[in-house]
Amino acid sequence: MNTAIIFGLLLALMLTGMPISISLGLTVLTFLFTMTQVPIEAVALKLFTGIENFEIMAIPFFILAGNFLTHGGVARRMIAFATSLVGHWHGGLGLAGVLACALFAAVSGSSPATVVAIGSIILPAMVKAGFPRNFGAGIITTSGALGILIPPSIVMVMYSVATNVSVGKLFMAGVIPGIMLAAVLGLVTWFIAWRKGYPRVKIFPDRTGGQATIGGFFGLFYAFVFTVVPVWVIGKLLGDAIGSEGAGYVLAGIVWLALAPWTTRSKMVTRVVYVALVVIGSPLALTLAMSGALTSTATLLGFFIIASVIWLVIIQACGRYTRIAPTFRFELMWESLAVWRSYWNSIWGLLLILVVMGGIYTGVFTPTEAAAMSAVYAFFVAVFVYRDMGLRDVPKVLLASANMSAMLLYIITNAVLFSFLMTHENIPQRMAEWMFAQQLSPWMFLLACNIILLAAGNFMEPSSIVLIMAPILFPVATRLGIDPIAFGIMMVVNMEVGMCHPPVGLNLYVASGITKMGITDLTVAVMPWLLSMLAFLLLITYIPIISTWLPSIAM
Amino acid sequence: MFMKILDRLEETLISVLMAGATLIIFVAVVHRYISTVPGIQDYTIGINLSWAQEACIFMFVWMAKFGAAYGVRTGIHVGVDVLINRLPEKTRGKFVIFGLLAGALFTGIIGTLGAGFVWDLSHTDQVSADLELPKWIVYLAIPCGSYLMCFRFLQVAWNFVHTGELPAHDHAQVEGLEETDLIADIARSANAPHHGELRR
C-alpha cells in the first residue's frame, strides 16, 4: 500500500514537469509528514550527509576535466588523428567520428559532452565533404553515447553510489563492451557508406585506397613503437638505478615527452628511431620472444638474421608499393607521416587515458583522486600546452562545470533521501521477496529489467534513472545470482539507448542543436545505429562474461 | 544593484570552491608521492594534509548547495516536461508555475528544517573529524543554500508571470570552437605537397 502511494505520488509530481530532484524531495517530505514517525531532523541531516562521500566527488572532477578538454582543443586533435587513420575508408569521416568519440569517451565521463566536443567539429566537416546531413548526425548521436560506457563514466559512479559496487571495477568492466560497441557502430557506418557510395576522404590525391591503408597503419605502428619502446627501455634502466620501477617509467615518460617537439621535427631522429626500433628492433624483439624455444646462441643468431632479412623485405615491398618508404631511405612519408604527426599532436590528450585508467588500475589513485588529477592535467594541457584557451577563459569553464555538477549532486542528494525512505519502508526487500516468489528465472528478470529501463529512458535522464531504479532492482539481481558488475554495465548500455531516442534523449537534442535538424528527422536518422545498439544490449545482457572478464583478471 | 552583487557573489563562490577543491586534492596526492622520495621527504613530511579529503567534501557540498541555486537561475534543473509541453500554452503555464512554487516550497521547508538543525548544533561543541571545524558552521550550507534556492525559484516564477520567459540551459552551446578545415589541416601537418580532395 505504502509502496503504491510513494510511487504514485512521485510519478504524479514528476509529470507536472517540476525538476526531478524536487519531485523526489517533495515525495519524501509528504510521506514523512503524514505517515511515519521518522524524526524530521534526520531528513535535514541526510541532506548533508547524503553526499558526504568521497566517491561521489569524482563527478564534479570529471565534469571539470571534460570541460577543459572540450574547450582546450583536445577534441580537435583527436579528430585529426582519427581522420588521418581511417578517413580514406568508406564513410571515412563517419568512421573517424566513431573513433574520435571512442577516444574522447576515454577521457570524458559524459555522453552529451562527447557529442558536443566531437560533433561540433566533425559534423560541419562532413557536410562540407559531401556526406548527407542525417548520416553524420546519426553517427555522432549514437557514438557520443560511448561517453558513459568507456571509462571514466559519471553514470557508473552513480551506479556505484546506489549499490556500493567498486567504481574501479566498473570502469575496468566498461572497457571491452565500449570497444565492442565502437566496433559495431563503425561497422554499421562502413556498411551504410559502402552501400550508398558515400565519398571517401583523401588527404592526398592520386593515392589508392590500399596505399593509404597500409601507409596509415604503418604510421600507427611507428607511433606505437616510438612512444612505448624508448620509455620502456629507459624506464627499466632508470627503475633499476633508482630502485623504484614505477618512478623509473614515469621519469622516462616525462623526459621523452619533454624531448617530443624536437624529436618529431627532426628528420634525423625519425630516421634513427626508424632504423633502430623498427628495422632492427622488431626482429630483435621476435628473437628475444623465441629465446625460450631456441636455446643455443647460434640458432638464435641465425633466427635473428633470417627474421631481419624477411622483415626488411616486407618493409621494402610495402614501402615500394605505398611509396611511404622508398628503398633504404627509412623515413616516413604521406599517410604514415600524417598519422604520426596527428598522433603526436594529440599525445597529451591520449596520455590522459593512461593517467586515469593506469592510475586507478595500479592503485596509485583512487577513482576520485584520478578524477581530480585529470582535471588539473586537462587544465594544464588546455592552457599551457595547446594554448587553445587562455587563463581568462578559466573562470567561465569553472562556472559551467560547477553549474552542471551542482545539478547532478542535487539530484543525488534527493535520491539518497528517497532511497532512505524506501529502505525505511523496506520496499526493496519486499519487492525482492515478491519477485523471488514469482519464480522468475534470471533471463526473464533481465528482460523485464531491460524493458523497464528502456521505458524509463523515455521520461528521465540517466543519472536519475540509475539512482532511482538501481536500489530497487539491484537486491533482486543479486538474489538471482546475477553479477553486480555485469548488471551495472547492462544498465549503462540501457541508459545509452535512452539518450539516443526521443522524447528525452539528451544526445539527440545536442545533435539537433549542432546540425539544426528537427528531432523527427534525427530520430529517423539514428535508426540503423540505434537498432544495432539494441542488439548489442541483448548481447551484453545475456553474455555477462564480456563485462566481467577484464575486472576478474585485472584486479 | 543588490541583485547584481548577489549574482556575482554566487557565481564567484561556486567557481572558487570548484577550483579550490581540485587544487587541494591535487596537492594532497602530489604530497603523498613526494613524501616517499628521499631528500625531499625531510621537508614535506612535516606537512600534514590528512584533512584534504574532508575539506574537499565540505567544499563540494557547499558548492552543490549554492550551485543548485545558481542552476535554478540558469534553468539547468530538468524535469519530465514531455507531457506538459503538449498542453495548450495557458495550461502549460499553470503547470510551470506550480512546479516552480513546489520547488520554492520544498527548498523553503528544507531551509527551515536545516536552520533548526544548525541552531541545535550550535549549542553543542561537536567538531568535524579532521578539520575540527564546529559542525554547525559546516552545516550552515543547508539553510543558506536552500533559502537562496527558494528565493531563486520565486524570482524565476515572478519573471515567468511577468514576461513569460523561462531560463533554459542549452547543452549544445560551446564557445571557443571555430570551424577549421580538417582535412587540409592534416595534410598541412604532414607537409603535404597537395591540398586534400575527395574521390567518389
Image (spheres, coloured by chain):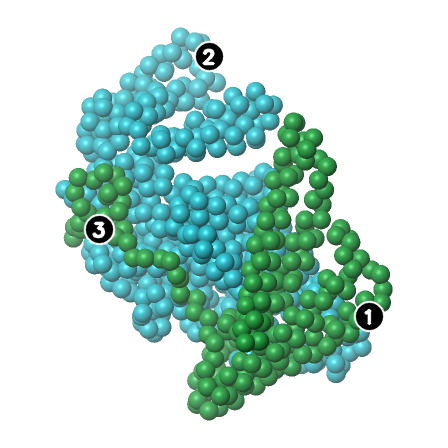
Please say if A373 is above or below A447. above
Q: Which chain is green?
A: B
Image check: A318 left or right of A14? left
What colour do you see for chain A?
cyan
Q: Which amino acid, mark 2?
A: Thr
User: Do tags 3 and 2 sit on the same chain?
Assistant: yes
Which image quadrant: the N terminus of chain A? Answer: bottom right
| Residue B17 in view in this figure | yes
Q: Please state the horizontal and vertical placement of residue B132, each as a whole percent of the image.
A: 78, 54
- Determine the chain carrying the residue at label 3: A
- Identify the image quadrant of residue A146: bottom left
Image check: A450 left or right of A302? right
Residue B193: image tag: none
Relative depth, front residue between B61 and A408: B61
> Please, which residue is most extreme toward the right here?
B124
Q: Which residue is mark 3?
A: A200
For the point 34% across and 53% down, which residue is it? A97
Q: Which residue is mark 2?
A: A295
For the point 57% across and 20% down, which residue is it? A241
Dot 2 crowding, Cα within 10 Å, few <14, some 14–19, many 20+: few
Q: Please state the horizontal and vertical placement of residue A375, each as a whole percent of the image.
A: 52, 50
Q: Which residue is mark 1?
A: B120
Q: Which is closer to the viewer, label 3 or label 1?
A: 1
| Residue A153 in view in this figure | no
Q: Which is closer to the viewer, label 2 or label 1?
A: 1
For the point 39% across and 19% down, which residue is it? A284
